[in-house]
Each structure stands twice: as structure tokens, then as C-alpha cells.
Image: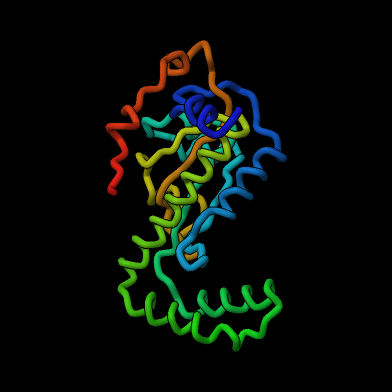
Amino acid sequence: MNTIENLEWRYATKKFNENKISSADLNRILEAINLSASSTGLQPYRVFVVENPSIRKELGKDSFNAQISESSHLLVFAAFEKITIGQIENYMLHIAGERGVPVEALADFKAALVGGLLSRSDEENFNWAAKQAYIALGTALIAAAELKIDSTPMEGFDAAKFDSLLGLTEKGLKSVVTLALGYRDHENDAFAKLKKVRLPLGDFATFID
């Protein structure tokens, strides 16, 4: 099946069955996320894979999102609360190592990042980082659909509880969005049988000549 057919197939799954995603498929989704578009390539967010059923149950307690605890795996996208000179310097070292160039050759790029990012407030940079995480979320949704793995993106969760239970705060991170992964329960998820509804493409997209 092609990408369009896979996206027609996917929907925000409401009920998952008990089947688990294989490690190989999970890693392919994570690899796709890691290759996602990222402004300046800095990747100012991290992804946490919550496999432990007890932790997922605690994270989902008192939430209307039952998928948190019922899915095979839960991905938590967490953005850095601030951008630091240390992060930029480590990024420069990583680029130099990967491309086999002296770090001094990246001086202009480093100066552009320092001037562009560190001149902004921490709140501005956090909002920018969160948007980068959402781009990665979109990549994850497509990658999962290509593998015929169901998914549910979710915002309605207790971020403070997630940050505490997953140890994000001490890492300088804050959870911004989650993604439940697994396989749809055809018998108990009424949405699995419904036709996907979207605007006609002619109404959705406008060509500017």
C-alpha cells in the first residue's frame, strides 16, 4: 500500500487490543522520528518510550485517555525548557564528528544559532522546541501507518505528573504531547468501522498562481 492509502487507513484509535509491537517495528518508528525535519537540526526535544505497564497505568490514572495504559507502547515527546550554550556547543561537536570537519569550520553556524536562539526568552525557545516535537509527532504517525501500527496522539494529560514520574524535570525537559501505539480492537472500537472523513481536497488546498 502507498502512503496515501496508509493515511486513509489510520485513525485516532480509541481501543487497543492486547497485541504488542515488535522491537523491530518500534525501532523503525523511532528511527523515523529521529530523521524528522528539525529547525537548524538541533532537535530540541527527546522521546521517551514507556513500556512498563505499571508506569503507564499510573500515568493514565484519572485521565480520560484510556489509551495511555491500554496501548502497547506510549511515546512521550518532551521539549527542553530552555536552550543553552552547552547544547549548541555539543551540537557543533556532533556535527564535526559526523561530517569529519574541524569544529572551527562551524564557527559561523554556531554564531548564528547563539545569536538567534540565545537572544530569545526561555519561554520563546520552549514554544519553538515544542513545535519541533509536534513536527516529529507527525512523522511518527506516518511511520506507524506505513507499518500498519495504530496510533493515538494525545494532549489531554497531566504534564506535571508525567514530568515527575518520568524524571523529565531534572533533565530540563517538559512533556508536550504523547503518542499511544498498538493495534486496534476491531470489536470494541466503534471508530474502527467508520469511514474517515476529511474535507474535499479542492476545499482544503488553495493554489496561488
* Whether residue 119 is situated above or below residue 152 in the rendered picture: below
Q: Position of residue 40 (x, y in %)?
A: 48, 68
In this orientation, which residue lies closer to the viewer: 81 or 115?
115
Q: Position of residue 8 (x, y in %)?
A: 48, 26
User: Residue at 61% across / 23% down in the picture?
Assistant: 18
Q: Quadrant of residue 26?
A: top right
Q: Position of residue 42 (x, y in %)?
A: 51, 67
Query: Which quadrant is the N terminus positioned in?
Result: top right
Instruction: Please indicate whether residue 95 sits to the left or right of residue 164 in the image.
Output: right
| Residue extending farthest front | 209
In this orientation, which residue lies closer to the viewer: 143 or 156?
143
Q: Position of residue 61 (x, y in %)?
A: 43, 34
Figure disc tally: 0
In this orientation, which residue lies closer to the viewer: 202 or 10?
202
Residue 167 visible within the image: no
Q: Quadrant of residue 25?
A: top right
Residue 82 visible within the image: yes
* Whether residue 78 is situated above or below residue 60 in the rendered picture: below
| Residue extending farthest top | 187
